[in-house]
Amino acid sequence: MTPEQVAAASKPLVLELGEAFSRCPGTLRRARLLGISGWAFYITGRAGALGDVRAETVAAALGFIAPDAVADGWDAAARTVRPVEIAAANLAECCRWGAQHLGEAPGTARLVGLLERIVDAADASGMPLFAAWRAMPVPDRSSGARTAVGLLLLREHFAGAYLLAVRAAGMTPLEAVLAGPEGEAGAAACGWPPPYPPVGPLVRRRLWAEAVTDRLASSAFRGLGPGEGAELLDLLTAARLHLGRRVPAA
């Protein structure tokens, strides 16, 4: 497999696994302990790695969430806790979830080795969120925790590549969301209010942007040896199946 093929094939698995910890009841409970809403925790937990920046900067980095919705979460959280502290809490929850859910997954030790090589090799140019997260110290060095963090980082790398590709395609982030599988429901979930532009002319541009995303992200996979791309896909699939067999825990 070529690096671009590995990137394209691994992307849906990474996008799913890399955010799984955020839906864990324990992660959502951390928001309540910090005295902020779940939305404020999501926005600031993800973008707080950027530090004490303005909401406009956060909206530009996140890209696909409406600026007003970003400001609602970011400003509300910042009145209570410093953004970097919320990001650290989010990372700690990611590690806790990974240790609990991925520590016993088949091939975890091998998977984390591949993920960390990919993340280390990734080019962070134009991807401030990915760069900021990669610089965050990981508080738990167990294989399950490191696997979850590796998935989180690689997910941010794909997200950053997609944002660059969407802009290169001449689309706005809102247009890209509308042309995606969730359409107007996805736009509403990301805080974009109607009325929405027509989707028809956008679909071909979005498909082009998806292909460019794979091309941009593929440089991170070039260090994999013969057969390691297929091995990575097998291990990601095994991790997904392992999670599917587990009963959700707090």
Image (spheres, rainbow, N blue to C red):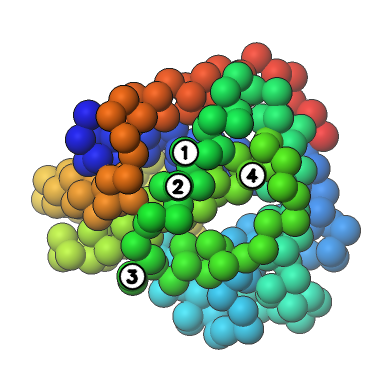
Amino acid type, mark 1:
Leu
The residue indicated by pointer 3 is 125
The residue indicated by pointer 2 is 117
Q: CA distance from mark 1 to mark 4?
A: 11 Å
Amino acid type, mark 3:
Ser
Would residue 164 be seen by someone viewing this image from the given angle? yes
Query: Quadrant location of the C terminus?
Result: top right
Numbered mark located on residue 146 in the image: 4
Amino acid type, mark 2:
Arg
The residue indicated by pointer 1 is 114
- Upstream in the sequence, badge 1 or badge 4? 1
- Identify the residue at image location x=69%, y=74%: 83
Amino acid type, mark 4:
Arg
Residue 64, position in %: x, y? Answer: 40, 60
Q: Residues within 10 Å of mark 3 (few under 14, many from 20)?
A: few
- Upstream in the sequence, badge 3 or badge 4? 3
Residue 15, position in %: x, y? Answer: 45, 41
- Above or below: residue 124 compared with residue 38: below
Q: Residues within 10 Å of mark 4 (few under 14, many from 20)?
A: many
- Upstream in the sequence, badge 1 or badge 3? 1
- Above or below: residue 25 compared with residue 192: above
Q: CA distance from mark 3 to mark 4?
A: 23 Å
